[in-house]
Image (tube, rainbow, N blue to C red):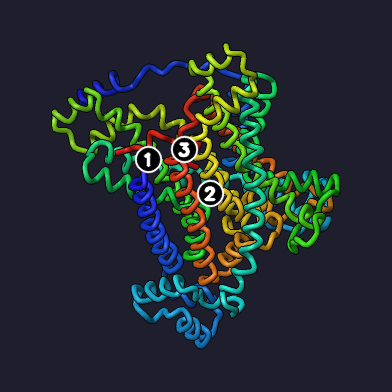
Amino acid sequence: MSATTATDGGGRTKRARQPMTVFGAIGLTLLAVNILLAVFGSFVAPNAPGSLIGGGAFAPAHDAALLGNDYLGRDLLSRLLHGAKYSLGVATAATLLGFLIGMTVGFSAAEIRGRYDTTVTWVIDILLSFPPILLALLVIAGLGSSLPVLIGTIAFIQCSRVARVSRSVAMGIAALEFVEVARARGESLFSILAREIFPSSMRPLAVEFGLRLSYAVLFMSSLSFLGLGIQPPNADWGSMVRENLPGIYYGAPAAIVPAVLIGLLVVGINLTVDWLSGGSDRHTSEELR
Amino acid sequence: MFRLIAQRLLLGIVTLWVISLLVFSATQILPGDVAIAILGNESTEEARQALRDRLGLEKPMMERYGNWLAGMVQGDLGLSLATETPVSRIVGLRITNSLILAVVTAVLAVPISVGLGLLSAAYPGSIFDKTLTVGSLLVISLPEFVVGLLLVLLLAVQLRWLPAVVSTPNFSTVDGIIRTLTLPALTLLASVQAHMIRMTRAAVLDVMRRPYIEMALLKGASKRRIILRHALPNALAPIVNVVALNLGYLVSGVVIVEVVFSYPGLGRLMVDAVATRDIPVVQVTGMIFCTAYILLTLAADVAAVFTNPRLRYAK
């Protein structure tokens, strides 16, 4: 156990508090509101997402539907509240899974090196040369669209990018003395990866996590917009933009509101990440979209 | 230099082969009975058997892959499951539309982005520079379909300048071309500009710090001359690379933008085929998009070699 305490003392750098900025505060607020919506949205929604509430298609705001009706005459607000959990939920699950796989692969490549590292790098390069949206389209053509398929596909797309970043982060850490000491002590590979390398890589990877998360939200809603994401009768914000698209000619806000919400969510995540990283670290991963 | 390029070409070919494997297997990994998955539970046994024969599902996987690849290389793309017409004919009509859209976007996007990048490098820290940075970042953090929707709302619904849907492109008159391409091209432009603007700005500013620029300044050369004649040539390598990479990104951007505007291109064809599980069409369109993407990233690397003398003389 003494090994763990030693690592915690030496491996982690003291975390300087980030001074709050205007953009940071806006980002955090947007993100917090979105998390609240995702968690409690389904419970506070006044109507069931599938129930017709009268007034007809694209009816303007009335007492039963504060934001008006959607293309079938359902309450837009309730559907938005019910749909909030999908965008953020799928994106979070997929990003977590992608990080679990990507970090394991990247860290182990940096620690083991040699032929294993060469092979891993080669596979990552090939996966990175595959346009993500096409990969997702192919998998969905093969497996059909369901929550596990969506999460798995986005996680798969994420993990090659995460593996590359965590490999380069871990390369530097694996060369430091305390990892050398752990190796000399005869610690297992898993213990070195989980207890020595992982804690020290938290800071740069936290920024990467935020960027990947916002990418996953974008990606998930784009798939839904194409009609290949969340399937009816359920709907996330992306699918709501799709189904209510004809409404914009009648001046109905049914397609605009979910589109703006997606934009606010992504901007919120990006601003938070920018604030966390002090506006510096984001350039490396932008090239990997 | 040629060795480096040959190596890169070889890697490109290997990648293409791996991609053909991926495209083929991704569309063949349906669990259970493929025929039931495509036709649904209510289908008759006869229909299912006919589909199995059509897709050659009774043959072993390797043989099917071999046949499929051989057909691809020879231009025999099979029949669409949905419309029973040869895939080559459907694709032929759509590919021109997509190419026109992509080329027009590229021709507009590259000079505009590089120009804006140069301008903001000429006046770093100015209001123009800051607005451009914040604006381009804001636009890129929105999904393409949201940007497209906002443009429709502004240009088609509010101002009524353009049609919101371009399902029947008209390339015969100048007016028709403008009405057809403006909205999709603008949306695509929005999704590729930020990276190019920022890279141009960063690369030029990086060069501007060098002593020889100060020398040029002291000689009394104009700002315009310093940036265009002294700084830009030395900043070209990263810019060319980013430009080629973003043209590669156009390939995936096209898929979404075509759906937003119901533009009859290859991207919409692929999305429709995925939704109806028209496997032969998905495979062909997937291969075309991936090939285009690989060629463009390859071009990015080759361009990087040509514009960077240090790589040119690598051992």
Q: Is residue B272 left or right of residue A157?
A: right
Observer-nearest residue: B77 or A169? B77
Q: Position of residue B79 (x, y in %)?
A: 54, 78
Residue where numbered disc 2 is placed: B248
Q: Element under label 1? A: helix
Note whether A142 is above or below A41 in the view shown.
Answer: below
Residue where numbered disc 3 is placed: B307
Q: Element under label 3? A: helix
For the N terminus of chain B, the quadrant is top left
Image marks 2 and 3: residues in contact by CB distance under 8 Å:
no
Q: Position of residue B273 (x, y in %)?
A: 58, 67
Mark carried by residue A164: 1
Specify few, some or many for label 1: CA neighbours under 10 Å numbering under 14, 14-19, or 20 or more: many
For the C terminus of chain B, the quadrant is top left
Q: Position of residue A1 (x, y in %)?
A: 21, 26
Mark carried by residue B125: none
What amino acid is at disc 2?
A: Gly
What amino acid is at disc 1?
A: Arg
Rendered residue at 68%/50% (across/down): A79
Image marks 1 and 2: residues in contact by CB distance under 8 Å:
no
- Tell me if I can see residue B252 in this picture: yes
Observer-nearest residue: B6 or B19? B6
Q: Are marks 2 and 3 on the same chain?
A: yes
